[in-house]
Amino acid sequence: MLAALLALACGGAQAQSKFITVASTTSTEQSGLFKHLLPIYTQKSGVEVRVVAVGTGQALDMGRKGDADVVFVHDPVAEKKYMDDGFGVNYHLVMYNDFILIGPKADPAKAGGKDVLAGLQKVKAAQASFVSRADKSGTHAAEVRLWSLAGVDIAKDKGPWYKETGSGMGPALNTASAMNGYILADRGTWLNFKNRGELTILVEGDNKLFNQYGIMLVNPAKHPHVKKDLGDAFIAWVISPEGQRAIADYKIGGEQLFFPNAR
Amino acid sequence: MNPLLDAFAGALALIASGDRALLQIVLLSLGVSLAAVVLATLIGLPLGAAVAVARFPGRQAVLVVMNALMGLPPVVVGLVVYLLLSRAGPLGPLGLLFTPPAMVIAQTLLIFPIIAALARQAVEDAWAEYEEQLRSLGAHGIGAALTLVWDIRYSLFTAVLAGMGRALAEVGAVMIVGGNIDGVTRVMTTTIALETSKGDLPLALSLGLILITLVLALNAAAQMVKEAARKRYG
Amino acid sequence: MSAILPLRLTDVSFAAGGRTIIDRVSFELSAGPSTIVLGANGAGKSVLLRLMHGLLAPSGGQVAWLGANAARARWMQAMVFQRPVMLRRSALANITYALALAEVPSADREKLAREALRDVGLADMAERPARVLSGGEQQRLALARAWALHPEVLFLDEPTASLDPAATREIETVIKAFDASGTKVVMVTHNLGQARRLGDEVLFVHQGRVAELTPIDTFFSQPASAEASAFIKGENPWA
């Protein structure tokens, strides 16, 4: 009876013996990209791609511990350290999307416009509620870098107006929506986000909001069990013209989300 | 419109649509939690019965620990199991992380204390009633405990149900050790968490209603079994 | 014939929770007369009964079966309590359970169990769930269960205290039948009329000590101890 129960439990996870584990981020998953992209790859290669979606920090950590075969995140600074420390090989740029500054339609801090740095300075000046993910994610790292470029040492200068939720993009957006606050988000999660309340895009298109994605194989020298061949095949496909086209084809409401830039 | 009514309508629509993905998620939830309950009962029930009947130095401390473990935070259990099953951890070579068996292991560890503690209470109460007579007849030790456990099996069923309810409802443990992988380790609770964080609250609510209904149905069925048994055996 | 009796208690004491409940008692029970244990509430009768049966271990002194078959003493005695404790099984199954514990061969168990049920007048209740029987029926079932092993000694702790007069009479009939067939009856009761109906001798317990062990008629007409006198009068103020 126990065997039957376990078989039932694994029912969905069919005995598809060929699979790889990819550590990626919640924002990428919540954008819906994987639901679009992965079936195409599985159809073509017969290999199942299992994505574990966590924060960028945790995804890179999974790579360090060897709990994944491939890491696919968007934090170039953290990725470089990871690669320099020897935890990854076969690194490639994949695509970029952008961040946007979101806030209440009424925009009490007058942060809207074309310049994200100016917008952030205005939010701080007005001490308007700002929601930060504060979770070592790529988005969080980008947010902190933008504050720094705007001349704000956010770790020192934050006040009660700066709300650190320690959560993923979706929950942070929920919080911002509930308190009508400002937040930096990735476009993919925003387009899929349904609980917008009074929130709208206030700043976009500033090239400082560029969000670059990288993919790398977990170093088999450090973790011999890593599925090197299957992992490399997946990476090769993602950066191939076919894979890049599949990425570009992903649209929400007719809008393209990710811009392939593999070299 | 009323979000709760929306959720009801949504739930019915979901069920009626016979969505294959939803069915897979529900079956996986049931499978994982059922397997965990079976294992937890195999471990926890004898343990609880033994502690109920035995007398040994430090017994009071054991009781305190058993009762306290009922409140183990799922996310902590998940974290501990994750560290054990991670490739960097002691059981890494088993390659169990991010699979349904890992979820079963985590849930088993989470709920066996509940079953053990509740079983201990039920057996201890019954032992007070049965002890003299059983010993007079010549039963003692494990034999007496087993006779007792079999006799009060329908009360013990309640302890098992409590464990089942906890397993079906938790999200912290299965999220961490399962990874919420689409089509592989995604269960009802992790799906609800995901849809909530995507801001799709109506869908999350609908799934929540389905989950609650499932648990209600399980409990109703169990209650009927108990009633039937009570009528038969007194 | 007598395989385990006589039963000798030598300087037996029992203490619990800092209190001495049984205080250095010595006496001997032999085969034949049915013994009624009498005494005021709290005198220690029930504890004494359990010490004799072996449910309690004495804190001092010795409880010894002196018969030829003393090694089998555990299986040659049985006890019926004030409230019968039945398993959630049929009446028959409760008896076969006891027989199984005594390692009676499985081929014989059902036959012996049905005989015992017949002997107490419960033959047509064999398949009914034991717990749905009335109080009196359950107590008769407890007696049948004790009887099925044909024990040499039957201990009873106020077996009819919770029963109505009709059920009480039924139980007394069964006990008398067991006594007649050679089983030694040792019974605690508060019912003096019952004592006279069923007993041959009285073991009178007062504050944890055995004050007398005398034939029943002597006990009621010429009690040897002042405590016994007071007890009889107390229980029967109109005597």
Image (tube, coloured by chain):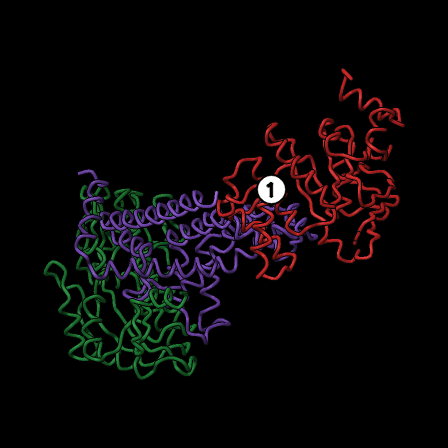
Chain colours: A green, B purple, C red
Does residue A249 appear to the left or right of C178 in the view shown?
Answer: left
Q: Position of residue C51 (x, y in %)?
A: 77, 44
Tag count in the figure?
1
Amino acid under disc 1:
Val
Observer-nearest of B165 and A169 = B165
Q: Nearer the viewer, residue B207 or A179?
A: B207
Is A21 left, or right, of C14 in this rendering? left
Q: Quadrant of residue A204?
A: bottom left
Question: Which percent across, then down, holds residue B150?
Answer: 52, 53
Residue under mark 1: which chain is it in?
Answer: C
Residue A84 appears left or right of B6: right
Point out residue C117 in the picture as x, y percentages from the top left corner: 57, 46
Q: Position of residue A80 (x, y in %)?
A: 35, 73
Question: Which residue corresponds to the image point at 49% horizontal and 47% vertical from the top-left?
Answer: C127
Relative vertical location of residue A52 with respect to residue B75 in this rendering, above or below: below
Which quadrant is the C terminus of chain C positioned in? top right
Q: Nearer the viewer, residue C5 or A245?
A: C5
Instruction: Work out whether C41 lies above or below A120.
Output: above
> Which residue extends farthest top?
C238
Query: Can residue C58 be seen at all in this image of the molecule?
Result: yes
Could you say whether the residue bearing mark 1 is in a helix, strand or loop?
Answer: loop
Residue where numbered disc 1 is placed: C120
- Badge 1: how crowded within 10 Å, few (<14), some, or many (20+)? many
In this view of the protein, can residue A73 be seen by the observer? no
Q: Residue shown at 35%/45% (left/top)?
A: B220
Q: Which residue occupies the extreme left position in the image?
A: A254
